[in-house]
Image (cartoon, coloured by chain):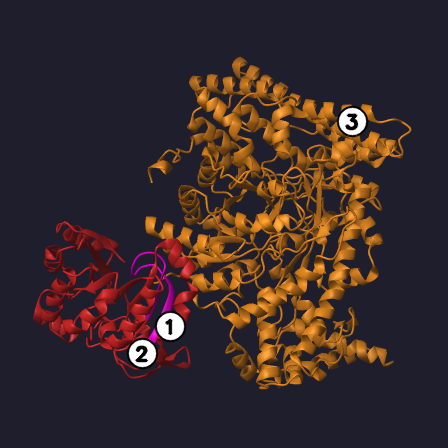
Amino acid sequence: MAGLEQFRIRKSERIQHLVDNLYAKLPEIEADRAVLLTESYRQTEGEPIISRRAKAFSHILKNIPIIIRDEELVVGSSSIAPRGCQTFPEFSFSWLESEFDTVETRSADPFYISEETKNKLKSIHPYWAGKTTSELATSLMAPEAIKSMEHDVFTTGNYFYNGVGHITVAYDKVLKIGFDGIYKEALEEDQKLKVSDAEYAKKHYFLEAVMISCKAVIAYANRYAELAAKQADALEAGTIRNVSNAASLSNRVAELRQIAENCKRVPEFGAASFFEACQSFWFVQQLLQVESSGHSISPGRFDQYMYPYYKKDLDAGKITRESAQELIDCIWVKLNDLNKVRDAVSAEGFAGYSLFQNLIVGGQNAAGEDVTNDLSFMCIEAAMHIQLPQPSLSVRVWNKTPQELMIKAAELTRTGVGLPAYYNDEVIIPALVSRGLTLEHARDYAIIGCVEPQKPGMTDGWHDAAFFNMCRPLELVFSNGYSRGERISIQTGDVTKMKTFDEFYDAYKAQMNYQIGLLVNSDNSIDVAHATRCPLPFESCMVDDCIKRGISIQEGGAVYNFTGPQGFGIANMADALYVIKTLVYEQKKISMAELKEALDVNFGIPNEKTITELAKSVLSGMKAAGKDISAATAAQVIAAITKEYMSHDYKYLLDMIEDVPKFGNDIEEVDEMARDAAYTYTKPLETFFNPRGGQYQAGLYPVSANVPLGAQTGATPDGRLAGAPIADGVSPVAGRDVNGPTAAANSVSKLDHFIASNGTLFNQKFHPSALKGQKGLENFVALIRAFFDQKGMHMQFNVVSRETLLDAQKHPENYKGLVVRVAGYSALFTTLSKSLQDDIIHRTEHMSGI
Amino acid sequence: MTGRIFDIQRFSVHDGPGIRTIVFLKGCPFRCKWCCNPESQEFGFQTMQMNGKVKQAGRDVTVEEVMKIIRKDQPYYHRSGGGVTLSGGEFLAQSDFARELLMTCKNEGYHTAVESTAGLDFEIIEKVLPYIDQYLMDIKHMNPKKHAEFTGRSNELILENARKIAASDTELIIRVPVVPTFNATKEEIHDIAAFAATLPGVKELHLLPYHRYGEGKYEALGRPYEMAHIKTMSDEEAEILLLEAKKSGLTCQIGG
């Protein structure tokens, strides 16, 4: 494959230095943004919220400390410490203060925080009491919805605690006309308004906020221009010496002068060169993440909007492929420089310091032509060079995707970095069209965050709106609406009296429908809270049609609006329903009462959590009956339950369940069950709308929430024990797919991926030997293409050996750089919690024929 | 028509081109001491005790039953240039069933390959050959005595059949299980490769280094594992033999 040779580009020494410096120490929490934000808010009390947001953004950018790291070519850092992070008290803050003393030592994503920072944050936090989006959201929510979240049926914690993020803005627009151009657009719209217009006040203050934001970003870039010039002067004058010899000194001086020139020109104006385009892109990417704490700010189709600048400079001889590659590599490093501190529970769910900045290459343009180009290959090359989790690299695949691109991507997969993820144009485009996008817009889709498709620069997709645990409503059928002794859902009747499978299944659907309604209530409440308290003028100015309509994206300014909450547990549900259908109703080998009893006692396998839950429900029953509960009674109850527990042996039942066919083995009847089980989530959701006027659309993926939320779920009829992880995405339950990768892929392809237009996630793990040699790569590509021929939507791979992972668990110090694919993203294995590490190790390994 | 198989393996990428489904037929006239599928040798059903569970080795299936599984991976064959491989045991030992299965595969447009020692009468081979695209043929040793000592049968018929298959329209690839103490010397490999090079149309030779993955199966069958004392080859040792094989002028590789 001669064509690929030209894209095997040497990695420059600079890139290795940048990476090494980035990972030299633990990331740190900094207080500057929060302090500046509070200063500004105190000065703008009583003004429209959109103005206050813009002024605070401007105040932050004017005063936040800036730094150019050694050897950087593309500049702009949100924290002084490498991989450091700022905080965002306007969304939530109390969790952070309560975790001040544990955040450095926790197992998932620890951060260093100095005493000085703690004190600074403590001094401003009181100001935010009662003013956050999370507090407003809580007061807006229905009490039933809050109760369901307390009982882990679903969680909307992501946008409850944080900004929304999850967007690809119009990077191309900034590259073309700069913020000077956007400023002028806003000004023009503002001048069109009449003070007598009904919506004048709202529109005018929004457009003014856009203009303030544009000016703020330009001023911020100019601060970098000055800093670069100053550093160049100091180097020449010999007042700083961080270069080893005369040649590298004059090189660095020239680089700094160039950086200063770049930052003077962009992002104020359109980019005139590839270097400027890189710098312009970076400021947008970085500053979106200063304005708000939302993650999954996704660069999208980088290979497309950067290409004209690359091509022009390459043709003119101003750059070489090597020099362009180095700039791309620099951006890749910078994408790992951004960071975010989450609360301890969320950190487990999103583990790996990931910001989910999804960047996608290849695919077709609005006209339906394949537009793979040099940069598509060089983006993959960059991921090979830096071997870090960000950006979450994705590849669009369709029938006209060049085989060379697929092979190049497979080579990256083979390195074991967990990248890229593969997406099927042939499913995603029609899926988006079915949601009301024009065909042209749908063809131009990019991926947000983990796996969520959207049209860049036009969509507010609210893609990661919730995690919905599909196994919990099943528990509610068995408990007739009770959880931990408390009534939390509708009553669907005594499960042991249900005469037919259909009756049982209808009860499950009723529990699903009720809980889905509560999820919608929760998400819509948070939606309103963001629109009310945290509209984002900077983000809005790069999304159509906010400027034309004169409203922020949070208030519905985008052309396309959605809310996309994820359901997970399809495989467990398919297996559980199939077990009930066959063993209870068809073969009548067990009674429902027997199954219920077995589930209540975790199949007779002692488990502290289950015992506590049982005790709770017994005690609450006693209380309701008017009995006095003392500590001694409680202890007696626990002792009695433990005894009762141990007296049951349900091994025969587990054996029976094990022999029932399972999802993931290409068995028609079970796969049909899975398809239908997925509909119990995806179909009701479609009927709901959000406050921005957009439709709900389901995703089927858990990020890594299947582990922590599985820990809150009792035993399920598929033989899964209490507390065990729920299946990952649309993948089969770990260890239950025994017919190899094609059988698993066929099962997964039988789900309706089109209706899950917020994305599905199919994970396969391969031992590196499966991708050995050119033949290995070709077969691997064929596997992806054949899965996509059958209308699968997404596929991603972990290529590591079990031994490697076990050893990494034992000796994390030797594997600091080991990257694995967790869910929709790659993460450093050693930063993951022990339970998540175990889950990854446990997932089926597809050793191809030895 | 039914046949007796002991396994069907999907997503196999080492026995023929592309992604393949391998059908393992039960029963074999040879008794190779290193055989990694000892349950493949007897035609009769056997019980195996593995991980505390009793499993029956062998089941009778119709051609249509096998086809149902084969068809499931059609998209993968199409994308990879793969297809179906019959292995064993020795598939020729059930030649009527094999013939019908291969014929049905060809009718449905699948690429067909077989993994075989070709140690039966050529009349039998002749019946199936028109439906085979690629013949992966084992040649284990050039010395008839040593061959008989380690496999239970001499090699004359095998070598003769090799010439006849080479003369047919079916693509022939020679494979050598490389087993220390049996044939893992430069001289022995050289002799096999030299013979293979004389076969018209043969372009490829695969060296398949001995491995011990089958050891557990002997235990499961309650049989002694005679090769327990043999050490597996290092990559370096295999490379040396590969260089020797290449002297024949054939395209040689380690593994399938």
> Dot 3 corresponds to which residue?
A189
Task: Kindly state the secondary structure of the residue where label 3 is placed.
Answer: helix
Task: Kindly state the secondary structure of the residue where label 1 is placed.
Answer: helix
Query: What secondary structure do most residues of the magenta stretch adopt?
Result: strand
Q: Give the colour in which the image draws chain B.
A: red
The three-letter code of the residue at mark 1 reads Val
> Dot 2 corresponds to which residue?
B3
Q: Is residue A725 above or below residue A2?
A: below
Q: Across the whole image, how many numbered discs are drawn on residues?
A: 3
Q: Is residue A601 above or below residue A723?
A: below
Left-right relation of B46 to A365: left
Q: Which chain does the orange colour mark?
A: A
Q: Is residue A36 visible?
A: no
Local crowd size for mark 1, using a 10 Å CA cut-off: few (<14), some (14–19), many (≥20): some
State if disc 2 and disc 1 touch (CB < 8 Å): yes
> Dot 1 corresponds to which residue?
B66
The residue at 38%/50% (across/down) is A777
Local crowd size for mark 3, using a 10 Å CA cut-off: few (<14), some (14–19), many (≥20): some
CA gap, disc 1 to disc 2? 10 Å
Q: Is residue B5 visible?
A: yes
The three-letter code of the residue at mark 2 reads Gly
* Magenta span contains residue B11: yes
